[in-house]
Image (cartoon, rainbow, N blue to C red):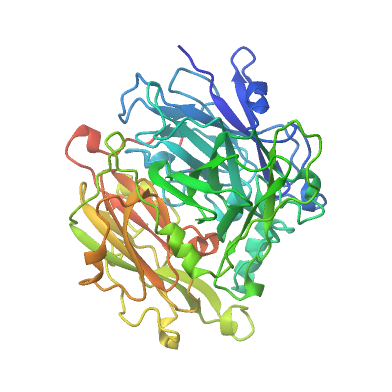
Amino acid sequence: MKKMPIFFYRTLIDNACFSYLCRLDEEKHSLVPSSELWKNQYISGRLGSDYRGCCSAKKSYWGSWNGSSPVCFWKWLRQSHLPRNHEQDQVVYTGTHDNDTILGWWEKIWRRKRSVMHGVRLPRNPWSDGPEYVTQCPIQPGSSFIYTVTFTDEEGTLWWHAHSDYSRATVHGAIVIYPRRGTSYPFPKPSGEVILILGEWWKRDVSAVLETARETGADPTPSDAFTINGQPGDLYPCSKPGTFRMLVEPGKTYLLRMVNAAMEDALFVSIAGHLLTLVGSDASYTKPLTSDYILISPGETMDFLLTANQSPRNLYYMAARALSYEPVNNFDTTTTTAIVQYKSQYTSWSTNPLLPSLPFYNDTEAASKFAFSIRSLASTNWPINVPKRFDQRMVITVSVNEFECPPGSCQGPNGTRLASSLNNMSFVNPSIDILEAYYKGINGAFDTNFPSRPLYYFNFTAEYQPFALLKSRLATEVRILEYGTTVEMVFQGTSLVTAENHPMHLHGQSFYVVGWGFGNFNEEKDPLGYNLEDPPLKNTFGVPTNGWLAVRFTAYNPGVWFLHCHLERHLISGMDTVFIVKNGVDPGEKLLPPPPHMPPC
């Protein structure tokens, strides 16, 4: 029996992105509001309202939007009769409802960009992955592209976003993957669910923010506000009427699906008077972890249970603010809010919502306590397969760097131009995408010498660093992996220029976070403390400030896959590289051929 796909309808008004639920009308071949879902309060608000918030007079990144071409996405229910293989669990972006496993999205754009299915493994199919000049060239204005998206064992919340410069600040949305029919969650079924997308807001055109940074060599201007479902919240007078409200019923439990779509900052989040229980992250179930606050890095998704067990007479703030080690004038110090409101027989509530207590912006202990308490569920019904051994270990320094400029021409530290690097190499986009060059055997687009060790060994986390170490090397270097190779990657944070928390994200593959620590990684002692029993399975995870992070994965997905920091300013300035996983022996271990409609360079 056919099932109606459910889409997210996204309005690109100014710098805000509001997600609404709609469905595909098979008879009219168009998207219409889904009143049933609307009544269930997945998203609070009124469809068609103009929530221009603080920037009603500001220019949109996409220019003047006339509402005629919405970007849509879906919730997808895996069917019980479908095997978990590479050919059948698919979603194709065609804009038509075909059958139980084929759903659609047709993308028409105004500026060149690429979109990526963040965290979807896309077995053997990097052609639909998304990063520009890595797996394809940008889609040109006025054109479209068909994505083929395959789900395998992902279950929970993922997301999609643009993957071209700062366009993902406004172009993003959630992906929800439910359990197969005949199966259930590893926790009692919640009474309802709410999608929460955390973002950032600039009063300026976000493309201008990036352009200024490129011209000056300095970091991009910090955002003017963080947002919850597109609104900064009550602490901003211009946003107060549209503050997102989550309606709950006393005694019921809700599943909160949270995405950190912020460009530059990990965020502490808390709800006044309530505890949050983590049950999943990056579409993988976790052991229940209950806390009065959480930390979520850019690119991460998390699923929480919230029990409505407080007085229905009060209103409760949900609040979020940044984790940062920068001076306070270098990052967004604002707090975004939403309101949790109880449905009850009372006709009035307290006029002042209760505020939660959030960790201080540079609270390393609070950040580490939550992030490194996450464990995989690792049960009989949801097993994991942690590599106990590895074939190769890579130690990769993650650094902020500087390039010298002619006097007076740059505004980075000490008149320099900021850069960033992995193992002292700042990645440079080629003129043709790496996937096409690899598949067609085109020489000269990239080199295969990305180092497995730092080029220089020094005290990576010292308070002061020699000036000679600050400069990186510009290169387009990739790493070749044989099919089936088990890799241990140790990301070593450094204090070059500035020490930061770096959320590292790997495309096409999830990894197990087996170890972490502060200071310099010790290859003999530190692996003795690895967690090889129930480490979390992630696609994005933060390298602690002035510390290290160890992950393991087995390269079972042939193709070209991007590795990068999910702080957008670092991705753009070179903190990335590419893994090329070679074909295996069997047909199911080989890279799929390209679709006939790849955009030209």
Which of the 4 quarters of the picture holds residue 505? bottom left
- Residue closer to the observer: 313 or 14: 313
Number of numbered labels in the structure image: 0
Q: Residue 359: percent from the left, percent from the top?
A: 57, 64
Taking the image as shown, residue 57 lies to the left or right of residue 375, namely right
Seen at 78% across and 51% down, the residue is 352
203 horizontally vs 5: left or right:
right
Q: Position of residue 485 (x, y in %)?
A: 20, 51
Determine whether 571 is above or below 28 in the image.
below
Above or below: residue 347 compared with residue 492: above
- Pinpoint residue 184: horizontal percent, then vertical percent: 40, 28
Residue 599 visible? The answer is no
Q: Position of residue 98 (x, y in %)?
A: 48, 18
The answer to whether residue 557 is left or right of residue 187 is left
- Front in this rendered view, residue 386 or 63: 386
Give the camera-side residue of 80 and 417: 80
**Which quadrant, please, contains the N terminus?**
top left
Residue at x 54% of width, y 19% of height: 4
Q: Which residue is most to the front?
A: 311
Could you tell me which residue is drawn at 53 percent across and 74 percent down?
418
Residue sitting nearer the eye, 158 or 428 = 158
- Can residue 199 be seen by looking at this rendering? yes
